[in-house]
Amino acid sequence: MNIELFINEAPFFKGLSEEHRGELARICRLAKVKKREYLFHEGEKGSDMFLLVDGNIQLHKNTEDGREVVIRVIKPGDVFAEVVLFERERYPVSARAVTPADVLVFPKAGIHRLLAEEGFRNDFIALLMAKQRYLAERIQELTTKDVEHRFFTFLRNQYGEKETIHTPLSKKDIAAAIGTTPESLSRLILRLTDDEIIDWKGKEIKILSNPWKWLD
């Protein structure tokens, strides 16, 4: 695998210069994660930032009554756990592979060495600010949008506005990702099927109408 090429194509790093992306490529390593294997647990001391190459990673928090609240499902090209670089010493969430996954691992110590360079530091902080805006929008979506809106927004963000979507995620994983129960998602799917909006069989979702037009 060409690590530098993948870093160059990752949306998160677009704001970095080619030189700075090359420096990141030299400090990272590739790791393989099995399905349901944890990369890290909530509260664990944070030592790395990650970039997902292939597969899907679920970020979740545990409530006091033992429930898992999914914060985000990471897709290839996404960076996660960057919060441990500056803001927190420990991971605020757990990260578990929902499919077999490949990740690039960026050691915290290595990134801190790069941040000693003013040019790299300014570029990188701008990237983190953009990520914070995304998370603020995500919180607003979960608290103000209905399940159907969150479902189609999730599909568009993960796979694009396609007529046929192939997803490795289970319905339970998708329900968690959009902040609802599997039962509520099943009722939604039944209604969308009856209304001939989608046709979901196995891992394939066919979009029969155009739900994307009213999302924004």
Image: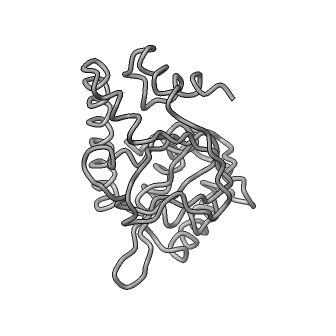
State the count of labels.
Answer: 0
Screen quadrant of the N terminus? top right
Screen quadrant of the C terminus? top left
Q: Is residue 192 above or below residue 79?
A: below
Please provide percent x and percent y for residue 73: 50, 54
Residue at x-position 43% and y-position 44%: 49
Relative to the observer, which residue lies in front, 132 or 92?
92
Left or right, 95 with respect to 142, comes to right
Q: Is residue 146 above or below residue 124?
A: below
Please provide percent x and percent y for residue 34: 68, 58
Residue with the most extreme bottom position: 65
Residue at x-position 60% and y-position 28%: 3
Residue at x-position 62% and y-position 45%: 31
Q: Is residue 198 above or below residue 15?
A: below
Please provide percent x and percent y for residue 142: 34, 60
Please provide percent x and percent y for residue 59: 46, 59
Left or right, 188 with respect to 124, comes to right
Residue at x-position 41% and y-position 19%: 20
Left or right, 140 with respect to 104, comes to left
Residue 164 in which image quadrant: top right
